[in-house]
Amino acid sequence: MDVSLIEQIRSYAADVAVDVPLSSVTTFRVGGKAACLIRPTEKELIRLLNIFSKIGEPYAVIGNGSNVVFDDEGFDGVVILIGKNMGGITVSENFMEVSAGTLLSEAANRAKEEQLSGLEFASGIPGTIGGALFMNAGAYGREMKDIVHSVRVVDRAGNIKIYDQAGLRLSYRSSRFSEETFSEAPLTPSEVVLSVKLSLTPGKREDIEASMRELMEKRTEKQPLTYPSAGSAFKRPEGYFAGKLIEDAGLKGFSVGDAAVSDKHAGFIINKGQAKTADIKELRDIIIERVKENSGVELVPEIRFAGKPRLRPE
């Protein structure tokens, strides 16, 4: 990556680093290096997107990195991490405005303190509110769609827009934003989430806390939380459970290198220590093939794999 461009980026953003291992910013703990990684404020992000679009500089946008895997060769472009520099929460009556980089756990705890119910399901999901909206994250029968009122976004030209719930096209693990990205592609959406406005329900703090504790106990009991992973590896096929299909195909515990199907929950692919992205991809393909042979069901990956950097066509 051109040194002069990095210096130009540093003139627009304070938190800029070069040659950053992507394993340090993704929950799977794999991937090569990012040529440049930025943790922008909202104001910096708006300006940078405009600049990158004008000069054609490839970039990828991530949150907490809990549902993405980068190539072993890395990303020879800019990775924009929407994190703590774009965090914050404001509450007004039953509405909670959450900046995109805020962790779901932080948002859920704030809702509890404000005695607002509805976000308990997300308290154990290791992602940001922006990432959760991007994929309509959910757990235990609830999803973002149930509580989202509206979303504020910025496009590549720096224009800010607001979408109401209907305009977000939220469906199972999908939104208008995730529809335009796809497996093996850079994560370069035409619009980036700035904040999410949630519509919650008044509740009692002790009841909300009890619900969060119960869900965390279930998560700890059933999921392989002691290993790096990207959460559920596959979307739930209609009428089936991905983990059960994988187990029935005889793949529980199966591994390629240090990438393995979890012994605890077959719906998870875990990193046993030194997994490579290539191992995860190979294991993913084997799982899809074996499950299709065994049950006739074709699994759809939930993990997004970021390939070589390039701007998506307009």
Image (cartoon, rainbow, N blue to C red):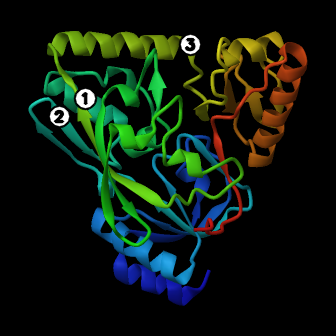
Residue lying at 39% horizontally and 30% vertically, measured from the top left: 144
Q: Earlier in the sequence, mark 3 or mark 1?
A: 1
Label 2 residue SS: strand
Residue lying at 37% horizontally and 9% vertically, measured from the top left: 214
From the viewer's perspective, tell me whether residue 59 is left or right of residue 199. right
Residues under numbered marks 3 and 2 in contact, where contact means CB atoms less than 8 Å apart: no
Residue lying at 66% horizontally and 30% vertically, measured from the top left: 233
Residue 3's label in the rendered image is none
Whole-angstrom CA distance, mark 1 to mark 2, is 15 Å
Against 190, residue 242 (above or below) is above
Whole-angstrom CA distance, mark 3 to mark 2, is 32 Å
Q: Quadrant of residue 249?
A: top right
Label 1 residue SS: helix
Question: Which amino acid type is marked by label 1?
Answer: Asn
From the viewer's perspective, tell me whether residue 200 is left or right of residue 140. left
Residue 95's label in the rendered image is 2
Q: Which residue is mark 1?
A: 109
Most extreme residue toward the front is 166
Whole-angstrom CA distance, mark 3 to mark 1, is 22 Å
Question: From the image, which quarter does the N terminus lie in?
Answer: bottom right
Q: Which residue is mark 3?
A: 222
